Image (spheres, rainbow, N blue to C red):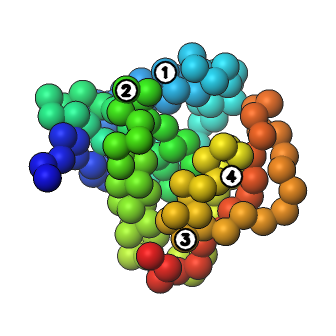
Amino acid sequence: MTSDFTTRLADFSVSKDAESILSVRRIVFIEEQNVPESLEIDGLDGDCTHALAFDETGNPIGTARLMPQGRIGRVAVLAPWRKRGIGAALMRVLLEEADRRGFEEIELHAQSWTIGFYESLGFVAEGDEFLEAEIPHRHMKRRRGIS
């Protein structure tokens, strides 16, 4: 089976990468999920490692970021591309990078409806549900070396 998308690490200091990252996040988080722009564009992107997914023609269709302390966030895939393995591919890119950097544990805040997706990648939910940007979330962790 041939893939109709590609993924790679991205550099937020490169304007084309930053534009691609922010365009996907604006559509998914700000427009679809009504996250306030002031929360979504938090000023931390320059310190993070990003992953991007592109369609066959080079249009950005998904993104995710790894924060310096080992927390993954801002995982977003455009609606027409969901349920096609893009989220998992983005996560694999960042998990491989986290392993390369020697992180023993990776954390994330999963929107509650996505817990099964993250469990399929080896994450375990911890604690009670909480609201982040008025959206129910759970804290999740994954130990190094789990596939």
Give x and y (percent) for residue 61: 34, 32
The residue under label 3 is: 122
Q: CA distance from mark 1 to mark 4?
A: 20 Å
Q: Residue at x 67, y 68 (%)?
A: 124
**Mark toward the start of the polypeptide (3 vs 1):** 1
Vertical comparison of 78 with 73: above or below: above
Residue 3: horizontal and vertical position, in percent? Answer: 18, 47
Question: Residue 42 placed where, x, y %?
Answer: 63, 35
Which residue corresponds to the image point at 34% horizontal and 43% vertical from the top-left? 84
Q: Amino acid at mark 2?
A: Pro
The residue singled out by tag 2 in the image is 80
- Give the residue type at disc 3: Gly
Q: CA distance from mark 3 to mark 1?
A: 28 Å
**Disc 3 versus disc 2: distance between alpha carbons?**
26 Å
Mark in the foreground, 2 or 4 = 2
Q: Is residue 95 left or right of residue 93?
A: right
Q: Nearer the viewer, mark 3 or mark 1?
A: 3
Nearer the N terminus, badge 2 or badge 4? 2
Mark 3 and mark 4: Cα distance apart in space: 14 Å
Q: Residue at x 22, y 46 (%)?
A: 6
Q: Tag on residue 109?
A: 4
Identify residue type, mark 4. Answer: His
- Confirm or deny contact between disc 3 and disc 1 (CB under 8 A): no
Secondary element under disc 1, as helix, strand or loop, is: helix
CB under 8 Å between callouts 3 and 4? Answer: no
**Position of residue 39 measured from the top left corner of the image (x, y, whole percent):** 69, 30
Q: Pointer 1: what residue?
A: 27
Residue 2 showing in the rendered view = yes
Q: Earlier in the sequence, mark 3 or mark 4?
A: 4
